[in-house]
Amino acid sequence: MSSNRQYELVLFGATGYTGKLTAQHIVAHLPTDLRWALAGRSASKLKEIAAACKSLNPDRIEPEIEVCNLNDKELDALAKKTIVLIATVGPYTVYGEHAFKACAENGTHYIDCTAEVPYVTKMIKKYESVAKKTGAIMIPQLGLESSAADLLTWSTVKKVRERFSAPTKEVIVSADFKSGASGGTIATALGILDAMSLKEVAEAFKPFSLCPIPGPKEQVSTPWTTKFLGVHIVSDLGTLTDSICSGPDVPIVYRTWGLLGGASNYGPRFKFSEYAKARNYLTALLFHFSFLFLKLFAVIPFVRKFARRYLYKPGEGPTLEQSKNDGLDFRAVGIPDVDQPTSSKAFGRATYSGSMYLLTGVFMSTAAISILRDEHKELTGGVYTPATLGESFIDRLVEGGFKIETKIYE
């Protein structure tokens, strides 16, 4: 892509809750010579964000202001001005397609933090072939969902390959994090059923819905009793239950499996599972059925309307002070696919202290600078995943506080 474009990076949706936090990380951690702009619908709000950015780091280039509404014409013009565009305007099912389409058609690299797998499925079907022709690197789901699980799985599989010279049979992730929910997250969770049918949503959240090739063979099914009770006892990880992130994370991990060679890399029988850490069997059981009832109630239009009235509105969310004790601790066990049975396995751990929404900003802005400044010759255009950015991306995340470590348990 030509470096003669006006900007290297545009943050679209900069006045929203996640957008503001992303801007803060850009100001604090990205190179000071970065040519960038804040984009959104309100010039006055954008100027407030720009002024706040200037006060945080007076030594860096102040961001330009780009007023842009949610329509094809204006986003097409905006995409032509920048090398990379970060889109934080959600729910993406309702508002996201204009930016995705513009970037795919103009060869502009695209990043977002959606967790709406049905939306991602639709975008892949409509625009991946276009992105391949223009060379646009499109990476949706680059927030908490699904960067943490995808990067940890990639690192664990890499450790298995290094130690055992073998593919990976299975990776199990234990997700443990503390976070409040922003208005945008709530609006997304409630709105997806307004925009799509239950059948469309169910199809999109199947494990291999985003996988570009047929899924791994010989997958071992989970016993029906475990599915019903929702309690999993895993050696080295403890007692686990349903993870609220597994819905969006599982299809992304399997898409990574397919994009990175499938059987020749992760392995021909590779299986991925993600659960949440539980204190004990009883709390695992209670969370499973509570989560199940919550999903059932969310199907009822009246319940969604009631929740919208009394919970955070879009643009609102926990302050950084309220989130200071939040954090993330994801752990993974990787089992090698070897001829002779072995008790040895790989262990991975991903950690972060602070707001999950700030972490989302860390993921997206760090991915942007990795695309701009690192070599990713293998990414020639199309819809990719967080892990396809590889080791250079993971290394850059350390400065933002997100760390992954792996080791072998003999």
Image: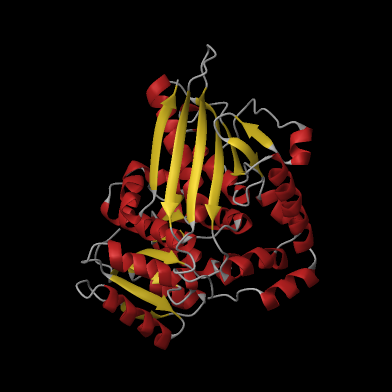
**Height in image: 102 above or below 340?**
below
**Which quadrant: the C terminus?**
top left
In the displayed image of the protein, which residue is found farthest to the bottom? 44
**Height in image: 204 above or below 302?**
above
Camera-nearest residue between 274 and 349:
349
**Which quadrant: the N terminus?**
bottom left
Q: Position of residue 241 (x, y in %)?
A: 66, 43
Q: Residue at x 72, y 47 (%)?
A: 288
Q: Is residue 299 left or right of residue 264?
A: right
Report the coloring of the rendering. secondary structure
Q: Is residue 10 left or right of residue 343?
A: left
**Height in image: 158 above or below 339?**
below
Q: Position of residue 106 (x, y in %)?
A: 40, 64
Q: Can the viewer see residue 117 in this picture?
A: yes
| Residue 406 falls in image quadrant | top left
Total marks in image = 0
Q: Can the viewer see residue 376 in this picture?
A: no
Camera-nearest residue between 201 and 233:
233
Camera-nearest residue between 168 and 335:
335
| Residue 93 falls in image quadrant | bottom right
Q: Position of residue 217 (x, y in %)?
A: 62, 27
Q: Residue at x 36, y 46 (%)?
A: 394
| Residue 405 falls in image quadrant | top left
Q: Is residue 302 left or right of residue 165?
A: right
